[in-house]
Image: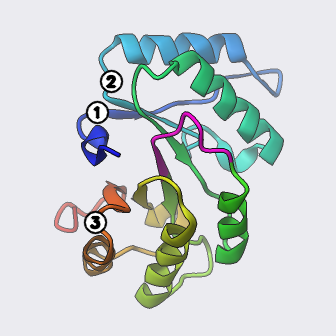
Amino acid sequence: MNNRQFTGTGVALVTPFTNGTINYEQLKHIINHTIEGGVDFLVSLGTTGEAVNLSSKECRELLDFTIKINDGRVPLVAGLFGHNYTQKLVRGIRNYNFDGIAGIMSSSPGYIKPSQEGIFQHYMAIAEVAPRPLIIYNVPGRTSSNVKAETTLRLAETDPTKFVAVKEASGNLEQA
């Protein structure tokens, strides 16, 4: 697996809705427009994509649609969020079909404010079962905890083939 595929510009796709349902025709337009604009990779089911507000079935349908429309033109990252319970996320990963997906992006557990060791163990549990490289999503505004640079470096040093990138959304330029 080429981990350089997550360099350059990655775009987190929005999920368009019409009357409370996913508007797949608009999503197709967004995907094609984004790829034609020269993006290096796509992110589906991120926070911009409203993944935490969709059912598991809707998430899978949206991801499958994105895989189909992307058709391998650019690497596709799948966001896996919404699980404050690490073992539930791990079970979900074990049962997930990752065909057409180049990487996984996940945040630390939200609202429970884990220690840095807790964050480290959370990501290590994901890495143990993840069949694709991981992007650490540090978004303290949503999770109520910051993945410190020391923890990110520790993860990367533990397994540089699994931990390949960071989406840094702390707003702290020194940390980035």
Q: Can residue 55 be seen in this snapshot?
A: no
Range drawn in magenta: 97-104
Image x and y of residue 42, in percent? 44, 32
Q: Quadrant of the C terminus?
A: bottom left
48 left or right of 161?
right
Q: Are marks 2 and 1 in contact (CB under 8 Å)?
A: yes
What's the residue at 47%, 80% (across, down)? 119
Q: Is residue 120 magenta?
A: no
Above or below residue 111? Residue 136 is above
Which colour assignment does the render follow? rainbow
Residue on which the image places disc 2: 39
Reading the image, the residue beneath label 1 is: 9
Amino acid marked by disc 3: Pro
Helix, strand or loop at disc 2? loop
Q: What is the quadrant of residue 27 in the picture?
A: top right
Q: Residues within 10 Å of mark 3 (few under 14, many from 20)?
A: some
Residue position for label 3? 160
| The quarter of the displayed image where residue 154 is located | bottom left
